[in-house]
């Protein structure tokens, strides 16, 4: 059934092997799609950057069998379930607790919990898994050119240390090449949003902060004092960390316009001491990175056979810890679509829904990070026209995918997000997590999803199950059916979250999003039409 052309070197070429590129390689690999990942750097991350891995990302990693391995790696880096707090300085006055524990209040929403792990800890796990699944990862090389035609994309790969170039032909390209995305630039894709608004630096340092931390388990510490605004993260041993400095002020309270212009050791030590609240503490500076806080998204996420994901199409300030997570979800959305198209199960038009579904999520998430940045760190940017804050759980789990591959119900209000504490189960939303009983074992409904389509039916929905299996057989599409009370028990009654009558059914895509729903009985061919629509057939 495969339509992969024999003369392709690789079905999918991934430009950039950082968080999003490696995650995408894993999501493709688990579906049997090998990829070639090309990365400029010599190996996985050497700077911690992202650390807050949200529930949706952990659910995605759970679905490919690496949740436990990631949790183990995370435990080596951080005491989990820490707080996110704002202070005048670490040793000084506490101002506010954004979270007392990063999982407080969200435990019941998902079988997976939020984790703290840096890109240094996470990327090697992703790399190992990607390679196990058949990905080839070529480091110290860059994709120097991409030429697409009607059948595929030809890429020129240049080793950075010299040596012969390699020409590769791929059916599709995923560009996960970061905020300055050379691929996006070459395609002439414009950015929309708020632009860059702060010259920032990240100072990596060593200092014994244990006496200042005391017994507190603090995951992120925002610092607001008359001289400096930024945030800390510390190592598990309390002997190192980094300080992001977003703004500094002189004695008259004037804001510095270009922090990055003075990154001398003496200045960085002064910043760290001011933020720690201990003018005499020994501090050793290890590294300083200059970057720009930006809140932008791309005007389009795809161009022909090239699809862009991660920071390449949405760059947001770290406030909220959304950026990397949003990018991982780009890869999760793309992977099942690419596989279905490559395997001839879906028409190529399915890939057009990547942009339609993910762009609104990218801009929404970026706006949410921007609002948090302005309110938490720099009200001077102006509070007018800010998107109102939506709860973190909604940003992470409650966004909606709307496209031609989703069959909206009549009267749908078109909402682009909802509170996952009150899931509607309607098409376009993430299928709700409910603990169910399968042959005496408690599993999450989410554990049923991941490979093919799944039809979940109410106890009297046998006709839907039969119709779905018949349609799937006729179309040659893998599909599983599960009927409440027959194939699984619902001891908690939580399955009501799917909004189905006893004779209703919901069709869930391989990425765990509801694509169609019948609240009650209906015509047999409804489900076939829905499946065809979800696959652009
Ligand atoms: C201080 C800080 C804290 C953060 N905290 C969080 C957090 O808690 N949670 C969160 O979700 N996000 C967080 N983020 C954001 C997160 O780090 C980014 O969103 C994420 O790293 C983006 O991953 P990416 O793979 O899209 O891009 P990148 O990590 O930028 O990777 C792009 C890769 O592409 C490679 N590349 C570029 N061009 C080419 C080419 N032509 N050929 C080959 N390779 C190429 C680059 O070398 C690079 O490795 C934070 C960011 C910062 C700065």
Image (spheres, helix red, strand yellow):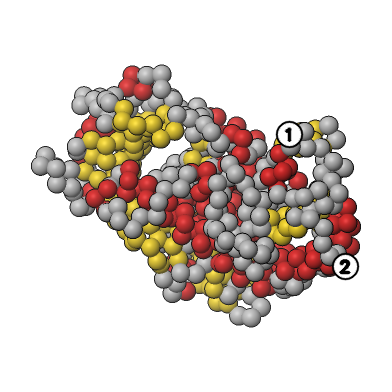
Looking at the image, residue 320 sits to the left or right of residue 448; the answer is left
Up/down of 286 relative to 428, above or below: above
Q: CA distance from mark 1 to mark 2?
A: 36 Å
Which quadrant of the view contains residue 415? Answer: bottom right
Residue 122, quarter of picture = top right
* Circles 1 and 2 in contact, beta carbons < 8 Å: no
Q: Position of residue 439 (x, y in %)?
A: 85, 35
Q: Nearer the viewer, residue 105 or 292?
A: 105
Quadrant containing the N terminus in the rendered view? bottom right
Q: Secondary structure at mark 1?
A: loop
Residue position for label 1? 492
Residue in front for this viewpoint, 410 or 75: 410
Residue at the spot 62% in from the left edge and 54% down from the top edge: 429
Res. 61 in view: no
User: Residue at position x 61%, y 39% from top?
Assistant: 109
Picture quadrant of residue 181: bottom left
Is 432 placed left or right of 478 in the picture? left
Instruction: Look at mark 2 in the image and give the residue it sits on.
Output: 474
Helix or strand or loop: what does disc 2 sit on? helix
- Horizontally, is 392 left or right of 508 in the view? left
């Amino acid at each position: 059934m495969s339509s992969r052309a024999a003369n392709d070197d690789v079905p999918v070429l991934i430009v950039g092997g950082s968080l999003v590129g490696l995650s995408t390689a894993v999501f493709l690999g688990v579906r049997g799609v090998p990829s070639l990942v090309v990365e400029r750097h010599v190996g996985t991350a050497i700077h911690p950057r992202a650390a807050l891995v949200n529930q949706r990302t952990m659910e995605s990693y759970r679905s490919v069998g690496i949740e436990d391995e990631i949790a183990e790696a995370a435990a080596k880096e951080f005491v989990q379930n820490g707080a996110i707090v704002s202070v005048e300085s670490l040793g000084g006055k506490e101002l506010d607790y954004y979270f007392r524990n990063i999982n407080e209040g969200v435990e019941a929403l998902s079988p997976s919990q939020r984790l703290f792990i840096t890109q240094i800890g996470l990327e090697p796990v992703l790399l190992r898994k990607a390679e196990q699944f058949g990905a080839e990862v070529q480091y110290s090389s860059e994709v120097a050119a991409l030429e697409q035609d009607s059948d595929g994309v030809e890429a020129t790969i240049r080793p950075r240390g010299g040596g012969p170039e390699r020409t590769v032909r791929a059916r599709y390209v995923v560009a996960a090449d970061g905020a300055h995305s050379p691929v996006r630039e070459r395609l002439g894709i414009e950015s929309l949003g708020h632009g860059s608004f702060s010259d920032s630096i990240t100072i990596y340092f060593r200092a014994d902060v244990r006496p200042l931390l005391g017994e507190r388990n603090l995951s992120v510490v925002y610092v607001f004092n008359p001289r400096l605004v930024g945030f800390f993260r510390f190592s598990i041993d309390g002997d190192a960390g980094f300080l992001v400095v977003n703004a500094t002020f002189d004695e008259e309270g004037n804001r510095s316009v270009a922090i990055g212009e003075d990154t001398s050791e003496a200045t960085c030590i002064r910043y760290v001491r001011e933020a720690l609240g201990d003018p005499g503490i020994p501090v050793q500076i290890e590294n300083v990175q200059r970057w720009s806080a930006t809140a932008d998204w791309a005007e389009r996420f795809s161009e022909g056979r090239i699809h862009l994901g991660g920071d390449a199409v949405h760059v947001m300030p770290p406030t909220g810890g959304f950026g990397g997570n949003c990018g991982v979800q780009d890869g999760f959305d793309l992977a099942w679509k690419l596989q279905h198209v490559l395997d001839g199960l879906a028409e190529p038009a399915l890939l057009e829904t990547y942009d339609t579904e993910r762009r609104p999520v990218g801009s929404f998430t970026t706006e949410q990070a921007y609002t948090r940045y302005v309110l938490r760190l720099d009200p001077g940017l102006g509070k007018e026209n800010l998107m109102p804050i939506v709860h973190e759980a909604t940003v992470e789990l409650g966004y909606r995918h709307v496209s031609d591959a989703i069959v909206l119900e009549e009267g749908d209000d078109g909402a682009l997000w909802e509170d996952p504490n009150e899931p509607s189960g309607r098409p376009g939303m993430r299928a709700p997590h409910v603990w169910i009983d399968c042959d005496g074992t408690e599993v999450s409904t989410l554990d049923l999803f991941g490979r093919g389509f799944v039809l979940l039916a109410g106890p009297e929905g046998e006709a839907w199950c039969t119709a779905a299996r018949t349609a799937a057989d006729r179309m040659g599409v893998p599909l599983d059916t599960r009927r409440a009370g027959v194939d699984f028990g619902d001891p908690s009654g939580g399955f009501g979250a799917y909004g189905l009558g006893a004779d209703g059914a919901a069709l869930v895509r391989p990425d765990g999003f509801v694509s169609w729903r019948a609240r009650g009985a209906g015509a047999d061919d409804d489900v076939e039409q829905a499946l065809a629509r979800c696959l652009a057939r």
